[in-house]
Image (cartoon, rainbow, N blue to C red):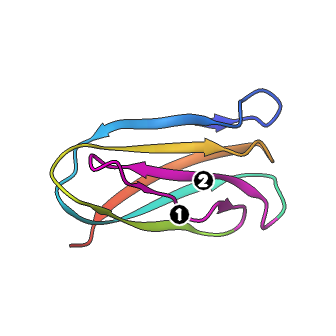
Amino acid sequence: AVFRNDTDPDRIILYAPLVGLEKGAYWIQMTCQTPAPVGTDLGRFEVLTSDRKTTRPPPVLAGTPTSFLFEQPDNLPARLNWIFSRNADMSMGDIIITRIR
């Protein structure tokens, strides 16, 4: 997915609705490319679970690996949102979700 700071909104712009994940802990990693200087805030993820809890990891920064941990409380679906900051153009690569327990 490619996001442009001059045309795309600064709100939820990409989401994975109702991702079926078993109860447990998950490591989420994302790759991206951007011409922005290192440290530029590109946006943030949030994960909404069925118990109405929201995980909000730190912002995604240019030139910094993006990964975070979240707890899935049950076997019901979760939703992964990407909120674009519009501070720079970016191209999102893979989003990898790995169960760690």
Query: In the figure, is residue 2 to the left or right of 72?
Result: right
- Residue type pointed to by label 1: Pro
The secondary structure type at the circle numbered 2 is strand
Q: CA distance from mark 2 to mark 1?
A: 7 Å
Corner quadrant of residue 83: top right
Q: Is residue 45 magenta?
A: yes
- Front-most of 57 and 31? 57
The secondary structure type at the circle numbered 1 is loop
Where residue 44 is drawn, which disc sits there? 2
- Front-most of 56 and 13? 56
Question: Which residue is identified by label 1?
Answer: 57
- Front-most of 63 and 58? 58
Could you tell me residue 13's position as x and y percent? Answer: 58, 33
Q: Residue at x 60, y 65 (%)?
A: 58
How many numbered discs? 2
Q: Residue at x 53, y 35 (%)?
A: 14
Callout 2 touching callout 1 (CB < 8 Å): yes
Could you tell me residue 87's position as x and y percent? Answer: 80, 47
Q: Residue at x 51, y 57 (%)?
A: 30
Could you tell me residue 70's position as x and y percent? Answer: 37, 64
Q: Residue furthest front?
A: 52
- Residue type pointed to by label 2: Arg
Q: Earlier in the sequence, mark 2 or mark 1?
A: 2
Residue 29, compared with residue 14, is above or below; it is below
Where residue 37 is drawn, which disc sits there? none
- The residue range painted magenta reads 38-63
Query: In the figure, is residue 34 to the left or right of 101?
Result: right
Mark 1, Cα crowd under 10 Å, few <14 / some 14-19 / many 20+, is: some
Query: In the figure, is residue 48 to the left or right of 64?
Result: left
Q: Residue at x 55, y 44 (%)?
A: 82
